[in-house]
Image (tube, rainbow, N blue to C red):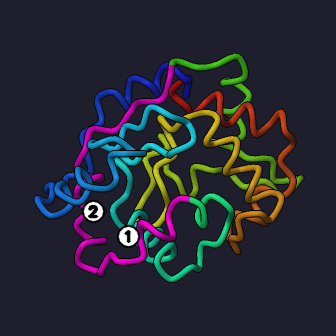
């Protein structure tokens, strides 16, 4: 699968199929759009794109922010206060709202996209690097609690993979899966998946 095919597939991909949410749209307009944009297509790589993201993933993350289980620096800095007063219904409706938005497609491919594609699709089993597609899907659109990674900001992808690798962001799943990635491989994966 080429980076071009990935881009073409994602451009034609429909939103998650979940109907949008009036409550979610209202909360996004009142609070979330300041960083993520009303439709979730943030313009700053400091803040992840949420448009087309998996509703279950968003709900799980918002609950983790609210309960302080996500305690990495960015979570504490940006999301603990925002999520503090969200009830479960509002969290679910925010998930539906952002999941129903048109996702940002992956770019045509950066300088290391071909190398990133190999890692994403095949991993490097001899080094304990599993194929990313096993959880995030063949085209990076995610599934349930596994997030959409295609079309994300490159700098955000690099930051998150680096945080998982270093243990700054705790994850029983992603910590072991990223610990053997080199900086160049993280750059390659970002080059393959991102849109900047």
Q: Residues within 10 Å of mark 1 (few under 14, many from 20)?
A: many
Residue 181's tag is none
Q: Position of residue 160 (x, y in %)?
A: 67, 51
Residue 31: image x %, image y %? 31, 56
Q: How many numbered circles does the render carry?
A: 2
- Give the magenta-colored segment's residue range: 78-107
Magenta portion: prevailing SS class: helix
On whether residue 60 falls in the magenta region, the answer is no
* Residue 80 within the segment the image draws in magenta: yes
Give coordinates of residue 158: x percent, y percent: 70, 41
Query: In which quadrant of the rendered view does residue 38 lie?
Result: top left
Rendered residue at 87%/42% (across/down): 182
Quickly name the residue at label 1. Answer: 59
Q: Which element is circle 2 on?
A: helix
Using a 10 Å C-alpha cutoff, classify the residue at mark 2 as few (fewer than 14 neighbours), some (14 to 19) or many (20 or more).
Answer: many
- Identify the mark nearer the N-term, 2 or 1: 1
Contact, CB < 8 Å: mark 2 with mark 1? yes
Is there any visible trace of residue 138 in the rendered image? no
Q: Does residue 2 lie above or below 15 as drawn?
A: above
Q: Which residue appears at 88% of the width and 53% of the height?
A: 126
Image position, residue 86 (x, y; %): 33, 75
Looking at the image, residue 77 sits to the left or right of residue 169; the answer is left
The residue at the point 60 percent across, 72 percent down is: 70
Q: Is residue 41 visible?
A: yes
Q: Identify residue for label 2.
A: 94
């Amino acid at each position: 699968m080429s980076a071009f095919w990935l881009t073409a597939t994602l451009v034609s991909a429909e939103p998650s199929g979940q109907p949008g949410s009036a409550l979610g749209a209202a909360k996004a307009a009142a609070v979330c759009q300041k960083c993520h944009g009303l439709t979730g297509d943030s313009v700053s790589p400091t803040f992840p794109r949420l448009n087309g993201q998996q509703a279950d993933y968003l709900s799980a993350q918002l609950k983790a922010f609210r309960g302080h289980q996500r305690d990495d620096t960015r979570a504490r800095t940006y999301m603990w206060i925002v999520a503090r007063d969200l009830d479960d219904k509002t969290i679910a409706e925010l998930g539906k709202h952002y999941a129903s938005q048109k996702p940002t497609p992956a770019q045509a491919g950066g300088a290391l996209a071909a190398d990133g594609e190999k890692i994403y699709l095949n991993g490097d089993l001899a080094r304990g690097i599993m194929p990313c597609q096993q959880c995030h899907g063949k085209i990076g659109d995610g599934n349930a609690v596994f997030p959409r990674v295609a079309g994300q900001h490159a700098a955000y992808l690099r930051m998150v993979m680096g945080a998982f690798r270093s243990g700054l962001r705790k994850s029983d799943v992603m910590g072991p899966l990223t610990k053997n990635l080199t900086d160049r491989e993280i750059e390659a994966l970002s080059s393959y998946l991102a849109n900047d």
